[in-house]
Amino acid sequence: MMIRATQSQGGRTGAQTFQPQLWPDGSDGPAVPARNASTGPSPAGRRFSDPDTLSRIRPESLLAWLHPARDYLARRGMVLPGDGNGQAVDYARLAGVLMEPTADMPGELVESLHVILEIAEPAGMDAILEATAASGLTLAVGSDPAPADVAVQAWLLDRALVERLHVSLELTRPRSFQYFAAEADPLPAFVLPQAEQVAALEARLNDWYDARKRGRGARVFVFPQHGECWFLVRHGMPCRREGTMEDGQPGSVFYRPQKHDVLVYDPARGEMRLNCCGKSERAEFLKAFGLHLFRDERFFPGTAKYTLAPLVNDGRNCLACLDVPGIERVVLKEVEFFFPVKPRERVTRKSDDIFALLEKGRVEWPKPPGAITRATFEIKFTAAKKARRVTILPSNKALYGRDDDSLLVERWLAARKFIVEETDHEDATGLVE
């Protein structure tokens, strides 16, 4: 798949300036619901084992959090202190219980452990303090709060708020992305999806996951930020059975793991980048999001055509063109690097000869090389008086100075392996770690 545009355009025409501050209905977006226990974490996978961490949670907050699970804890030998009885919390015993969860641990406790464990870090605490202050909620944090204490207090005050923050922080974790550009030119205006669009998208994804034995309960969360629109898809994975030991006896626990996938749409570039499992799931995401955001299942082509890996793998040799009649020379003039992990950064380097900068040590290829998201070549055609530029954006977009340049350029790109061979589509370097 390929997009052609004249160089004077400077990119796609008709792209709308994206204003991400408000949702279409003027609200702050659909609320994040409680997680479905059927796609929740395995009890064996969530451990709160440090007595010192537990001791830094205010006792009244700790007891209020654990109170709904008091019967379960009592069966495990951890009796919670009663109101006014003067007993102290046995943090070592409590840590032991949480460190060795059993299959009958209440789902509410499992879920809260999952969220609190992952958000009880400095960045999570900062997000909670900022959000609770904005919401008018008061936390008894003192001058030196512990992240776990802040997380538990906030959970007790507004569970939905903590869950939204947890999902939002999930977006910032380091990931690998593959890029897919839209075919439309000009690009249609992008509008943040309404609640009914999100519901329809979830219904389609639930049918897809259910048909592949991953269960239902998939949800899509939408986060407009930094001029882009981020989508986090939470869904189940195939069920697992793991061996356990309970009271010295072997047993097993059967559960469905939970997974988060991330998609990011860049309205200015008409580009969707994805972090997900495999080829079939990626294809379904592209079709589903294309249909429900733009009413077109093929809005995002599902195959990778171009890769910029030869820039790194072959160095200056990737510019060789003597074997392509009609092309006299090729020079790399411009490259763009994109680093999606916070603090996100997009860097553009321009030069008369980028490889000359590399050879002098003034530029280095990023690690991983998939962070190279754009390359512009100056190509001198035999039949032309002046060189013209061609820009390649993995995984499927090429910008030509003139449409009739495409035939020779495609031959050169194929010869230098900038065009992905059919068997290599799954591994095309549109990946950014």
Image (tube, helix red, strand yellow):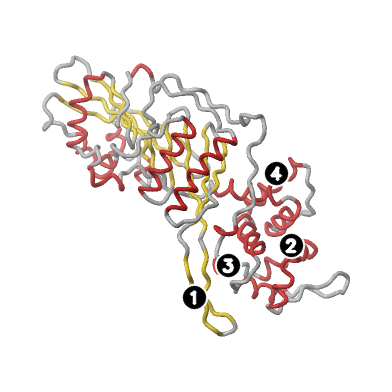
- The numbered mark, 4 or 2, whose residue comes first in the sequence reads 2
Q: Residue at x 59, y 67 (%)?
A: 47
The amino acid sitting under disc 4 is: Ala
- Residues marked 4 and 2 touching at CB (< 8 Å): no
Query: What residue appears at the point 74 percent right and 70 percent down from the top-left corner?
Result: 70
Q: What element does badge 2 sit on?
A: helix
Disc marking residue 65 = 2
Residue 243: assigned label = 1
Kindly identify the residue that appears in the image at 56 percent across and 31 percent down: 192
Residue 294 horizontal/vertical position (percent): 46, 30
Q: Residue at x 76, y 76 (%)?
A: 79
Drawn side of residue 175 relative to residue 158, left or right: left
Closer to the camera in the image, 243 or 338: 243
Q: Is residue 243 left or right of residue 126?
A: left
- Residue 62 image-quadrant placement: bottom right
Dots 3 and 2: beta carbons under 8 Å? no
Is residue 258 found left or right of 122 in the rendered image?
A: left
Q: Quadrant of residue 41?
A: bottom right
Badge 4: residue crowd in 10 Å (few <14, some 14–19, many ≥20) = some
- Going by the image, does 277 lie left or right of 199? left
What amino acid is found at the position of numbered circle 3 in the picture?
Answer: Pro
Rendering coords of residue 295 (x, y %): 45, 30
The residue that label 4 is drawn on is 131
